[in-house]
Image (tube, rainbow, N blue to C red):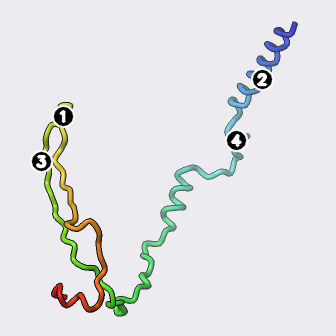
Amino acid sequence: MQKNQLLHTLLWISLLLAMGCTSQQSHVFGEDMPTMKTIHDDKFHSISPVLPERRMDHQVQNTDFEWLPNPTVYLYVFKHLSPTGLPVPGYTTFFKLYTTDHIALPSELSRWGS
């Protein structure tokens, strides 16, 4: 008896779920909904092509502290096969000569040719 009741309950739940999938789009979303193309066109054609202003004053610079030179070395690795035999394309990598960048005091800049 309990097994019958469970089957009937599952049947009704599955029927209700199936009926929800067969609803018409107009009943769910309404008749006056815009299409995706209209939404896209309204969004991207209304954006003005004017770039935002940069509010940085280039005349004012704090020259009390500057970075000490830390040269960058670029290395090109040619295409090759990995140890497992897979091809690796050629690529460029870089590294700095010093592990950290340092800030110079105003008195140290004259030694670096600045």
Q: CA distance from mark 4 to mark 2?
A: 24 Å
* x and y percentages locating residue 69 in the rendered image: 21, 77
Q: Are marks 1 and 4 in contact (CB under 8 Å)?
A: no
* x and y percentages locating residue 74 in the rendered image: 16, 61
Q: Which residue is mark 2?
A: 13
Give the amino acid at mark 4.
Ser
The residue positioned 72% from the left and 31% from the top of the image is 20
Q: Which residue is mark 1?
A: 83
Give the amino acid at mark 2.
Ile
The front one of 69 and 87 is 69
Q: Are marks 2 and 1 in contact (CB under 8 Å)?
A: no
| Relative height, residue 86 to residue 57 (above, below) | above
The front one of 73 and 88 is 73
The residue positioned 18% from the left and 71% from the top of the image is 71
- Between tags 3 and 2, which lies in front? 3
Q: CA distance from mark 4 to mark 3?
A: 60 Å
The answer to whether residue 69 is left or right of residue 62 is left
The residue positioned 83% from the left and 9% from the top of the image is 4
Q: Residues within 10 Å of mark 1 (few under 14, many from 20)?
A: few
- Between tags 4 and 2, which lies in front? 2
User: Which numbered dot is residue 26?
Assistant: 4
Give the amino acid at mark 3.
Phe
Q: Which residue is mark 3?
A: 78
Q: Quadrant of the N terminus?
A: top right
Q: CA distance from mark 1 to mark 3?
A: 15 Å
Circle 4 — which element?
helix
| Relative height, residue 63 to residue 37 (above, below) | below
- Between tags 4 and 3, which lies in front? 3
The residue positioned 71% from the left and 46% from the top of the image is 30
Circle 2 — which element?
helix
